[in-house]
Amino acid sequence: MEKNIAKEIKKMKNEFHKKKEEVRDLKELVKKEIDREFPSDLKNFSEKELGSQMDEYISFLNKSVDPVPDKTSITSHRRLIGKPVVWIKRILLRMTRSYITLIMDKQKAFNQKCIALYQNLIIHQKKYHEKISHIEERIGECEVHLNVISKKLEEIDANLVQHRTDTSPDKPEKENI
């Protein structure tokens, strides 16, 4: 058994290294880093993987609740004129802060409600999953009981048929001596 596990692990490692080489070949073909994520097929995920992905999404959403930019989020990618551009952006932000906060407060409230709804749906889904599991267990128990009852009915039917053939009028009765 341990040999089978060791062989399986070795096989999986080889497959992993082949896929890793394919990705390297793709990067060399493109001549730059691949910067986008490829969506995974959620149907192939296990319960644990789905749970961890939902936790990851909820933490991302919690970080992104407040849409109002702060001073550190204002940057520029320009080398020479980057500092003046950042300075102008900060001045514009200060000047429009009151108008932006009116709009962004509504957006923040909406974001918070969406996160609360998302968490509520996750809890709801877990409760229904537990109920379905409980129902499946009860159905399994009922199937077992149904099989037992079916076998007993077959035995009773066989005994009844046997009894009928033993006491049929066509068969002469044994004489008492």
Image: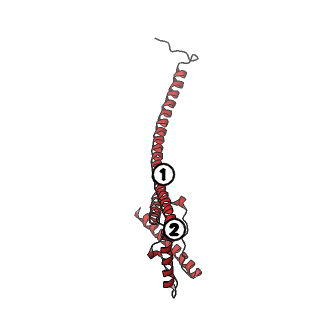
Front residue of 36/63: it is 63
Horizontal and vertical percent position of residue 119: 46, 56
Query: Which of the pair 81/157 is nearer the observer?
Result: 81
Q: Is residue 175 visible?
A: yes
- Residue 91: % across, % down: 49, 78
Tell me if label 1 and label 2 are in contact, CB under 8 Å: no
Label at residue 101: none
Quarter of the N terminus within the rendering? bottom left
Disc 2 is placed on an element classified as helix
Left or right: where 136 falls relative to 28: left
Query: How many numbered badges does the structure rendering display?
Result: 2
Residue neighbourhood size for the residue with mark 1, other residues' Cα within 10 Å, grouped as few (<14), some (14–19), many (≥20): few
Q: Is residue 86 above or below residue 115?
A: below
The numbered dot on residue 99 is: 2
Q: Which residue lies under the disc numbered 1?
A: 125
Image coordinates of residue 12 in percent, x first then y, are 48, 68
CA separation in Å, label 1 and label 2: 40 Å
Nearer to us of marks 1 and 2 is: 2
Residue 115 vertical placement versus 29 (above, below): above
In this rendering, the answer to whether 176 lies above or below 102 is: above
Q: What kind of residue is marked 2? A: Tyr
Q: Position of residue 164 (x, y in %)?
A: 54, 21
- Residue at the image position 49 percent from the left and 39 percent from the top: 143
